[in-house]
Image (spheres, grey):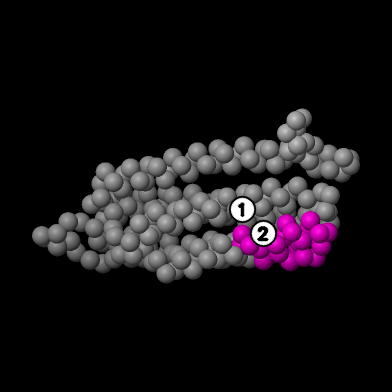
Amino acid sequence: MTTQAMTAGRAPMPGMKVYNLKLGMWIFLLSEVMFFTGLIGSYIILRFAHPEQFAAPGQVLNINLTAFNTFLLICSSVTMVKAYAAIQQGDQQGLKNWLLATIVIGASFVGVQVYEYIALAGEGFVPIADAYHAVGRHMPHDGPAIGGQLYGSTFYTMTGFHGTHVSIGVLCLCFTYWRAAKGAYTADNLGGVEIMGLYWHFVDLVWIILFTIVYLV
């Protein structure tokens, strides 16, 4: 193993053949799995326990806009795979191009989410709002409420935490791009790109789950 690879944190753990940075990222992602499992599990329990507090799919949230945003994030996973494949082949320019594409798409995802928040807040859908007021409706005297305080609180908590993870990922991608521009990665020293890809694919997978249970179910 070269000295350059060792200094980049790519020394394998004894008997595991996994370099330190990758092992560290796996451990971190396992903790993130537990974190998001807690959030999603709490949401599911609250939704089944208080169905009157949650609106039907599409009644408050913009499914079409978020479906487009989900497509953007999936595309960013593809560009991240392309970036890793490029540096595996020693293609420095390809690495930079695909990393830049991932950054732009990831930032666009965050931008669309901010736009969605602004639009929902403008309609009155805030963490403690009743969904009737969110869509400018009045609760009929003979019908049940379509949403309540739990709906806004759980929605903004889960999507907000995920959006924060994506924002942090975009910043880390910018750092990775900066290092790539300086020629820090090669076919024999690509650990930084690989662990960044692991993180990025994780936040993409989490979003697909959130989109399904929050927007579609």
Q: Residue at x 25, y 46 (%)?
A: 50
In this view, 50 is above or below 98? above
Say which quarter of the image contains residue 110: bottom right
Q: Quick one: which residue is furthest to the right in this view?
A: 2
Label 1 is placed on what type of residue? Trp
Question: Crowding at label 1, few (<14), some or many (≥20) Cα neighbours within 10 Å?
Answer: many
Q: Quick one: which residue is furthest to the top in this view?
A: 14
How many marks can you see? 2
Q: Which residues are magenta?
A: 76-103
Q: Residue at x 29, y 54 (%)?
A: 54
Residue 41 located within the stretch drawn in magenta: no
* Residue 206 at x, y percent in the picture: 51, 51
Q: Horizontally, is 29 left or right of 190 in the view?
A: left
Mark 1 residue element: helix
Magenta stretch: dominant secondary structure: helix
- The residue pinned by badge 1 equals 200
User: Is label 1 in contact with label 2 (beta carbons under 8 Å)?
Assistant: yes
Question: Crowding at label 2, few (<14), some or many (≥20) Cα neighbours within 10 Å?
Answer: many
Say which quarter of the image contains residue 23: top right
**Location of the N terminus (image quadrant):** top right
**Location of the C terminus (image quadrant):** bottom left
* Residue 71 at x, y percent in the picture: 52, 66
Q: Residue at x 77, y 65 (%)?
A: 94
Judge whether residue 72 can be spotted in this image: yes
Q: Residue at x 24, y 61 (%)?
A: 132
In this view, 86 is above or below 26? below
Mark 1 vs mark 2, CA separation in Å: 8 Å
* Residue 149 at x, y percent in the picture: 29, 50
- The residue pinned by badge 2 equals 80
* Residue 126 at x, y percent in the picture: 35, 56
